[in-house]
Amino acid sequence: MNRETYELMEKYMRSCMEDSAHDQEHIYRVLYNALDIAKTEENVNYDILIAACLLHDIGRKEQFENPALCHAKVGSDKAYCFLTEHGFASDYAERVRQCIRTHRYRRDMQPQSLEARILFDADKLDVAGAIGMARTLIYKGAVSEPLYSVSSGGEVLTGENDTAPSFFQEYKYKLEKLYSHFYTGRAEEIAKDRQQSAIDFYNALYHEVSTPYQNGRKELEKRLK
């Protein structure tokens, strides 16, 4: 891919990114992760991979405005239209579209090509470790969801089996479980290296918010008459 083509796609990507948890820096991290992974694989088509990485989240705005939409589906169609309108071959545009369409985890839509699998892994890595915790906190704040839920008895819930959305619920439901089932060995290696930082953060945060509830409620009861 020449620099002019890269800058054309980059400019379009930047015009589409408005979500602070899925901003242009997320795109660059995914791209850089993908290039790292690609070095360990054979016969990677870098023209497809770079384009797919740059454009993979351009449908986020539409999904944010209408949660019934899937940003992977919307973004893949937007990418195809953008590429064909700018003179790229339809076969190339379709291969990029398929990468983007399958980058979001769904059982019925698995990535098939090598480039699609690399994009999937690279995007998943940006939810792992400390960066994944930070991005989730940003997103939860943006949609006005709390850090945690409290039981009827006044105890901070761990997130395990919670039905109400919160950061702790997202950690137990998703973030804690994403360190396996990567398509590439390099991505799994990076994820395992990041895993402990996420565990430590969750444990520290849970301790810091639950301890005041445990001790403070007892002290409060002593002061109330």
Image: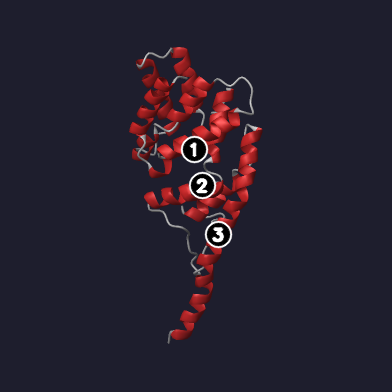
Residue 108 appears in the picture as rendered:
no
Query: Relative to residue 161, is residue 218 depicted above or below?
Result: below
Of circles 2 and 3, the one toward us is 2
Residue 86: where, in percent of width, then height? Answer: 36, 16
Q: Secondary structure at mark 1?
A: helix
Residue that carries the numbered disc 2 in the rendered image: 131
Position of 45 with respect to 77 (left or right) is right
Q: Tag 2's secondary structure?
A: helix
- The crowding category of the residue bearing disc 2, from other C-alpha atoms within 10 Å (few below 14, some 14 to 19, many at least 20), is some
At x 55% / y 40%, what residue is drawn?
125
Pick the quarter of the image with the C terminus. Answer: bottom left
**Residue nearest the observer in this picture, 47 or 113:** 47
Q: Residues within 10 Å of mark 3 (few under 14, many from 20)?
A: some
Q: Amino acid at mark 3?
A: Thr
CB under 8 Å between discs 2 and 1: yes
Q: Amino acid at mark 2?
A: Ile
Q: Which mark, residue 158?
A: 3
Q: Nearer the viewer, residue 119 or 216?
A: 119
How many labels were placed on the picture?
A: 3
User: What SS does tag 3 mark?
Assistant: loop
Q: Earlier in the sequence, mark 2 or mark 1?
A: 1
Q: Quadrant of residue 5?
A: top left
Give the residue pinned by disc 1.
29
Tell me which residue sits at (50%, 20%) in the image: 47
Kindly identify the residue that appears in the image at 43 percent across and 39 percent down.
25
CA gap, disc 2 to disc 1?
10 Å
Q: Is residue 223 above or below residue 188?
A: below
Instruction: Pinpoint residue 111: horizontal percent, then vertical percent.
Output: 56, 27
Query: What label sits on residue 163 in the rendered view?
Result: none
Q: Gap in Å between the C-alphas at discs 3 and 1?
A: 30 Å
